[in-house]
Amino acid sequence: MLRTTLAGLRAHKLRLLLTAVAITLGVGFISGTFVLTDTLDEGVSKTFARSADKVDYAVLPKSDDTDKGVPPALLGQIKALPGVTDVQGAVKGDAALVGKDGKAVGDFPTVGMSVPSGRLLRYDVEKGRPPSGGGETVLDTQLAKREGYSVGNAVTVLDHGNRPHRFTVVGLVDFGIDQEASFRGAVGFDPATAMRMTGEKTYRELDVAGGSGTAVRAAAGGAYRVYTGEELGARLARAAGADTKIIRTGLLIFGLVAMLVSALVIYNTFSILIAQRMREMALLRCVGATRRQVFGSVVAESAVVGLVGSLLGLVAGVGLGEGALVVVSKLNERVAVAGPSLAVRTVLVGLAVGIVVTVLSALLPARAATRVSPVAALRADLEPGAGRFRLGPVRTVLAVLLGAAGLAIGGLGSLGMEKGETAMYAVAFAGGVFFLGVIAAMPALVRPLGRVAGAVPARLGGVPGRLAVANAQRAPRRTATTTIALTVGVGLMSLFAVVAASGKATAAQKLEEQFPVQFQIRPQSFDGTLPHALAETLRTRPEVAAVVETRRKETRVGGDEADISTITTSALGKILKPEFEHGSLDAALKPGTAMVDEKTAETAGRAMGDTLRVRTANGAVPVKITAVYAAGAGLDGIIVPERDFTRYFGAVDPAGIYVKTRDDVPASQSRRVVDAAARPYPAAKVSSSAEFEETMTKAIDTVLMIFGGLLGLAIVIALFGIANTLTLSVVERTRESALLRALGLTKRQLRRMLSVEALVMAVIGAATGVVLGVGFGWAATNAMASDSVFSLPYLQVVGFVVLAGAAGTAAAVLPARRAAKTSIVESLAHD
């Protein structure tokens, strides 16, 4: 039987190669993911280990709370220990670099960091030298390149109070081992200047050179952790490696989708192969082969195919991983990239997944092979899988139960549960359950769906078109398994497209609520403020219709820390229009009152009519909640009347400024006016509603593009399944094709027939996927939030079906050419 199995593999090289390609793509994606993330992990570990080698001991607070740092007094104590040659405190805080346009660079302030000189300098100085003295700074290399600064330039940096200071750039430094600095950009000073600029009172970390671990631990006491240099490197690498774990998990999810589609393709291929070799199996039984031997030969054949496909997938994975590394290094030059890392784990996982998926996919066809009676060798059967398909009572019940369960769970998650993460998980689970029901029912749906999908091709394609539609319908099991693979990819693509479009629509609606004016000015740092003079300047401009200031003060409310806010009184009800759940605006504007948004009230256990004890500059005062409003329209939290706020806390600069311009003023002119008013204040960031909406749209489109690219792999595998099915179909219908040729069908018409057949199968799969994707996209949108807006991207959805049809037609090119080249006489003699 082993020799027979090997002979069968040699006899069906092309068919099994196409099957191996499907598994190669799936395994390649999974192994490529491991290669990419393992190589990044290795580079990160080496980078941090090299940095930490310069440190003998590091002292850090036990708590991760950045407010609880290491006091300067401890630095002096450790410096006095015997054998200690140097101690440096690490300082980190906000210190915004001002660009050449006079505005603070970036959406967030650049990080102000201490850069020591000597042995404990852990960053790479790529040009120049470390800073020394209060007038020198170093810049992050990428930041300097982006803003056009170099060694010798004079730059302005804002301190923690947004006061400008001039520095001379004496060096360019790679801060790549600090993730926050890599993201926001960084400016470096000597430790004393860093403390002065950032306003920090403590150190984030003490780095120690020399001394003994016992002495350092004794000096640090129980409130601080002491790490060796090696332990510090491992700790930093683990923290940085969290990102690669997230990347790995996300990519592996898409890899598993690809493997699911591969499994469907493999199952279909082996089902057709076994059906085509029924007589061969029966003859083997006639000459003495047992059922177990026949079953074993099919399983062995699938294992060989899985092994070959997995080995090719590992090779492809290394190539994919290396290509991804090149892209990553181009996008971010700080990423440490070495040669691709192929771990033993990657090889074992790739081989195991590929072989197991292939063997499991072939088990049902192998079991079908054992049912072949030896008598079957004496008669000719119908085309495998042909004839009218009936679900049968068991399959009908299963399909109905799964479909009903999917709809019920999806409806519960979408409409019956509290919106949020749990509801979305319920919808995702419902989608999986319903999809299983679709798989069970799909063979019975092929004929009606085929009539719909093939209506136009049958009418326009003449005899070849009608024959193609009939061919797609006459083997329902085969067509169902072929198309369901495409349904997975297109369904997920449609779901993400619907969620993305709905996200844009929801964002646009929220933007209209949150951004009720043309411009918003905010400080660069989250807890920063803007000068009141900026608002007064804007009020003097004739182009400006209204200026709204929001103020915020952190204080104690009862026993908790909370923010108390206020809004320019004239804007409430006119520009900012809260929707009240309880009470009214008039009640909320009376002295001694407050209005609270519904979510804050719920989480803090506060309700309409409660009296809050608010700590003010003059002691605690009672404030009564007289209104509860729905968060939105630029409002949230506890809001008190403007006069009360001033009485409680004195003159407080605004945390944000809204600017409404006159309707008759062109947008470009309005922007120039607002920019001119904000120019003297580098930390004041101006954004318009149009720009904000464009930023959100681009972000959503980028995510959709990434998902589309990853899911494209599943669609490619599904198209290989269509090509595989057609190739096998051409072989088994050799005599039929020859007979059609003998009756007058030309080569071109034969090719057209097979192309239309592939088109119909692709449209069936894509249309089913679109329906499922749109349906569960709607459910997912409803599950996200109560105020989500559903939007159907019609053009994208239609485009998916059109592209799937075109790709399916392209997949039929080689099988169709093969069928057209076959000799009529030889084909009629084929048995």
Image (tube, grey):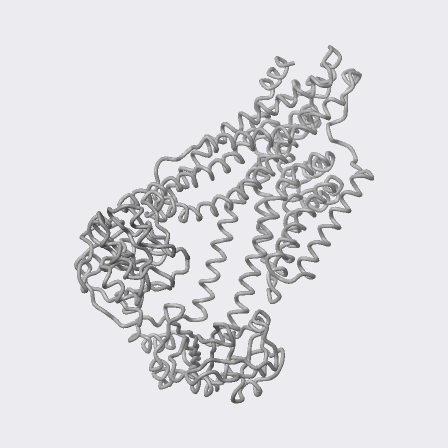
Task: Identify which residue is drawn at 62% across, 14% down.
Answer: 2
- Is 812 or 484 nearer to us in this picture? 484
Q: Is residue 725 visible?
A: yes
Looking at the image, can residue 662 be seen? no
| In the image: residue 528, left or right of residue 381 | left
Image spot of residue 24 (x, y percent): 52, 32
Q: Residue furthest right?
A: 393
Q: Residue at x 62, y 66 (%)?
A: 786
Specify the quadrant that holds the C terminus: top right
Instruction: Check the image and report above or below for 591 versus 201.
Output: below
Q: Is residue 467 left or right of residue 576?
A: right
User: For residue 183, what is the image quadrant?
Assistant: bottom left
User: Percent x, y for residue 240?
Assistant: 40, 48
**Marker count (numbered):** 0
Q: Quadrant of residue 18?
A: top right
The picture places residue 88, in percent across and down from the top left corner, at 25, 55
